[in-house]
Amino acid sequence: MSGATHGTAPGPRLYDRAAELAAVARLSDPTGTGGGGILFVTGGPGEGRSALLARAAGDFPGAAHRVAAPGHRVPWSGARALFAALAPGAPDVRRALRTARGEDGVAAAVSGLLGDLPVLLCLDDLHLWDAHSRAALTAAWRRGPLPGRPGPRWLVSAARHHRLPGVPGAETVRLGRLGPDGARALLGDLCAPPPAAPVARRLVEEAAGHPGVLVAAVRRLGAARLAGAAPLPEPPVDGAVLTEVYGGFLEHLPADSRRLLTVVALAGRTGRAAARPGGVAVDAVLDGARATRTPVEPLDGLVADGLLRRADGLLRFEDPFLGRAVLAAAPASPHHRARRAGAARTASALARGERHRADRLGPPAAVRALAPVVRGRSHLVRGLAALADGPVMDAHEALLRAAELLRGRAPAEASDARFLAMEAAWAGGDVDACLAALGLGGDAGGTERDFLDGLAAALTLRFDAARPPLARVVARDGAEDDPRLLLRAGSAALVLGDTAAAARVHARALARARAEHRTALLPRALEHLAYAELRDGRYSGAARTAREGLRAAERTGQRNVAAHQHAVLALVASVTGDGEAVAEHAGLALDTARTHGLAQAATLAEWALARDERGRGPAAQAAARLAPLVRAGPRGGHFALRMLVVPCFVEAAVAAGRTAEARSAAGEYAVWAAYGVDGAAPALLARCRALLARSEGGGEDGEAAHWFGEAVRRHDGCGNDFERARTLLAYGTWLRLRRRPGAARGPLRDALVTFERAAADGWADHARSELRATGGAGGGAADPAAWGLLTPQQQRIARLAAQGATNREIAGRLTLSPRTVDHHLRGVFARLGIRSRVELPGMVGAGLPAQAGGTEAKGLVSSRARRSAGPS
């Protein structure tokens, strides 16, 4: 929600906020040092951050705009919300965002929309804004207002645990709890007539000065209870009240952090015999986490963020209300209640040191009495539900148990459970869990035996042992009619690196699923086919399949499958250069992936964002995003995708100056390429070596030239035209930089044709600009309409820069500052779709108007010539 206020309506009444209101008054004072000031306000859930922003907006003498965090953390969604607040209903807001993307561009666009009037911008919940918008805002705050502009005042709220950016001159206030007098005054505002004195005392005591808790508690009590005519609930501040206050905060925490907080809360509640008053033993929490398969990696972050406090080997909640809210917000379905009760018993036993009893704790006797087949099928149903729309490692656990119970009793269902458990672990990026599922197939034979043995060998990097059994699985796909078995054959083909066979087999599985009206299986079949087509370089086909799969997944409530399809669509959009589609699909994929532990979908989405960033901006940002994806271990990328990302990382890292990291990743990639399971790997490895040699100054007939030639030669046999075009683009760029424009035009033209054929507009623009820089045609004439989008000042600056004038010389000629000239040039590059001033002569010389600035340019160049000639 966003809107503008003009100081006519007073803000809400606040209590015990004298210091905070004084800071707001200093920020808003029109007689002070003026614009560009920034005030950060931090606090916990319900402590009044939004109320303070509303009060500041109501009291501000000029225009005040309040902007809430967008619903999804899609890249640039925060900037879009800010633009919409500053120019509501303006038809060019979307274009402004597209033009302004980047730290400097967003700052300049905001400044242009604000004008010269005093403005207060109130941004709520900065911790929920997307990282791109936060980075752009931080850059704007650090740079300060543009020359000649007063600049806005910024009032920014964030959760207490959020790490605020370092901004010189910024002030920070931290909201605390109310005192007894402030709480009683707030209670008086909330209740008309005032509550009975005993009720008021109890509410003030129970709320402990927390304004949000007090408001929520009063809201849930009727007039009879407030008047003392009916007894208060016990306790007055119960789980429902705390869920109302803390529920939104908890929902936005990562799933693993929430689960670990639940373990701490359960251990603190059930383990009082062993836990001292200062908290619960850290060892008991860690043991409880292992017993409930809860990752412990978030612990250090929770302590650093101030949600937990660790001292003397004990852990406790910094905010006791948060611990109670964590327990209250736990899922309440019968399955989750049973699981929560089991976790509580386990935590209690571990906290008391009864490890032997904790290991023996199991399901209730009534459940154990059921027949193993019934229990196995129950676990299978729960696992399928979680695999479709839940944490995938929960699905793995249920499916693994189903396979154990059904083995030897219901062979077909046990086989399905094994395969689905492996798929769940694969989606979660857990190799050991994949091997655990495959290891349950001791009674399997025939094709399934080959599949289990071959995949287990591949996961342990024994590809010589993996090839024969997996090849037999793929070869027998023609005899299979069951779409489930065809999906396994297609997966085997992908592991072998035969992407064409994988696409063919998965297309057969999809056809069978349609023919048999397998509605629930259809989204999974489409997911497998879309990924196979993506790996095979069939981007338009992958996009069509993924869109159909997305519709099927949404119809059947399979959010995990939908997340994977969003990730595929994001990667395809990163090829076509549709930045807005990349941001939208990647953001939607990550929303579900981070909640449900979908490491595969998350890696694909982050990869797509990085490829888009690499095509549109500085390489440093793309390299920083890609670095974790190529790293091994629990905090790294998906085990099956790490090596696929390496060539993209090497390109970005070399351009960003991170040569040592690029060389290390390329070394690991060389080992991977030697396995022979990725047909494109030899060509991509040669490209990586060429880029590394180029960064180290390889001569034109030296190492870089050799590896570029090898890369192009090897691409001819692997069939991925898009990657071949990227190699040609890199090769042509290198030749141009080696001052060999004639030799560069051939590779660049070939790359441009391929990109245009694939509708890869962003990459085609890049190739076109490189071709123009060689003096070639650049794929077409310049567009006069683009020149018409420039302001007269931008046109003058562009013409002078095209003649070779420096920023300082242009500034002196036009009576501007060099910084303002630089700002205008960035806008010129964005409007004309070019990357640097090197391309300006081609744009001006290709038929764009030049008469208005010709005299200025000639005079400037003439004066430079006279200076260089010296006195006569």
Image: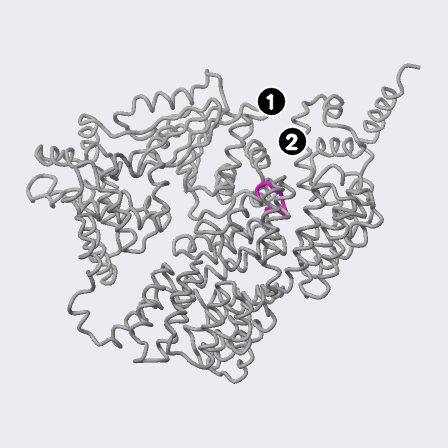
> Over which residues does the magenta segment extend?
613-621
**Kind of residue indicated by mark 1:** Gly
Q: Is residue 569 left or right of residue 593?
A: right
Report the disc number at residue 148.
1
The secondary structure that dominates the magenta segment is helix
Residue 289 lies, with reference to residue 137, above or below; the image says below
For residue 17, which quarter of the picture?
A: top left
Q: Name the residue beneath numbered marker 2.
A: 823
Q: Disc 1, disc 2: CB below 8 Å?
A: no
Q: List x then y, in percent, for residue 589.
A: 47, 55
Q: List x then y, in percent, for residue 580.
A: 56, 50
For residue 318, which quarter of the picture?
A: top left
Q: How many marks?
A: 2
Identify which residue is drawn at 6% across, 42% down: 229
Query: Does residue 603 show up magenta in the picture?
Result: no
Quadrant of the snapshot with the C terminus: top right
The secondary structure type at the circle numbered 2 is: helix
Residue 19 lies, with reference to residue 379, above or below; the image says above
**Kind of residue indicated by mark 2:** His
Q: List x then y, in percent, for residue 72.
A: 44, 48
| Colour style of the rendered protein structure | one colour
Residue with the most extreme bottom position = 479
- Residue 759 or residue 414, whichever sits in front: 414
